């Protein structure tokens, strides 16, 4: 029997190893190996794969932010209208759908280009788009509480339903834009 040649990590030539990158087949040590669903890969191959995923252009961030902010601003106004009916319970059913619609619109405007930072930019745009409506209705109610003119929970309901809308719509839009699929 012959002894197999000892392999050494291509990054750390003083470290013997038995691991190889499953993409480029170079020997890698345990420190350089990253576990993926298909096996171990070197960090360079993972970086190359990440660059393939990040396809966003510089102006996509502006377009995603503005589109999400405008869509969320319109949806926030609709939340005010809906919150008067059935004490706002319709918001629970409509907010995820509004988030999905906003997410689809953003995807169309950015032509399906992708980047993790781009998805976060759209989510921030949704929050910023809802802020004017939220502040317009929450500040008077909060000032009323502070100065003793509290008129009951009814004065806070529009602001509460706006927050509920944001908590439900932003994750729905984020999953729509990022392409995350829940379930099978």
Image (spheres, helix red, strand yellow):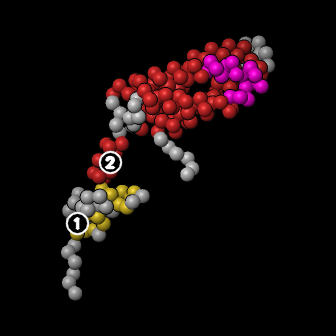
Relative to 11, is 102 above or below? Answer: above
The answer to whether residue 41 of the structure is visible from this angle is: yes
Specify start and end residues of the magenta stretch as a single range. 76-91
Q: Under tag 1, what secondary structure?
A: strand
Q: Position of residue 157 (x, y in %)?
A: 72, 22
User: Foreground: 156 or 13?
Assistant: 156
Q: Under tag 2, what secondary structure?
A: helix
On residue 49, which mark appears? 2
Q: Position of residue 107 (x, y in %)?
A: 45, 31
**Mark 2 residue crowding within 10 angstroms, few (<14) / some (14–19) / many (20+):** few
Residue lying at 39% horizontally and 31% vertically, measured from the top left: 111
The answer to whether residue 131 of the structure is visible from this angle is: no
- Residue carrying label 1: 8
Residue lying at 53% horizontally and 28% vertically, measured from the top left: 102
Secondary structure predominantly adopted by residues drawn in magenta: helix
Quarter of the picture holding the N terminus: bottom left
């Amino acid at each position: 029997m012959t002894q197999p040649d000892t392999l050494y990590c291509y990054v750390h030539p003083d470290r013997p190893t038995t691991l190889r990158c499953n993409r480029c087949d170079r020997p890698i040590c345990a420190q350089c190996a990253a576990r993926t669903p298909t096996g171990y890969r070197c960090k360079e191959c993972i970086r190359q794969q990440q660059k393939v995923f990040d396809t966003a252009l510089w102006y996509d961030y502006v377009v995603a932010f503005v589109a999400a902010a405008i869509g969320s601003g319109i949806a926030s106004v609709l939340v005010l209208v809906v919150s008067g009916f059935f004490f706002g319970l319709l918001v629970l059913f409509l907010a995820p759908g509004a988030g999905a619609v906003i997410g689809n619109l953003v995807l169309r405007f950015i032509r399906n280009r992708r980047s993790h930072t781009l998805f976060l930019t759209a989510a921030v745009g949704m929050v910023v788009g809802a802020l004017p409506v939220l502040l317009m209705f929450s500040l008077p109610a909060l000032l009323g509480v502070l100065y003793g003119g509290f008129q009951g929970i009814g004065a806070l309901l529009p602001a509460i339903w706006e927050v509920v809308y944001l908590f439900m719509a932003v994750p729905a839009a984020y999953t729509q834009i990022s392409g995350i699929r829940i379930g099978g």
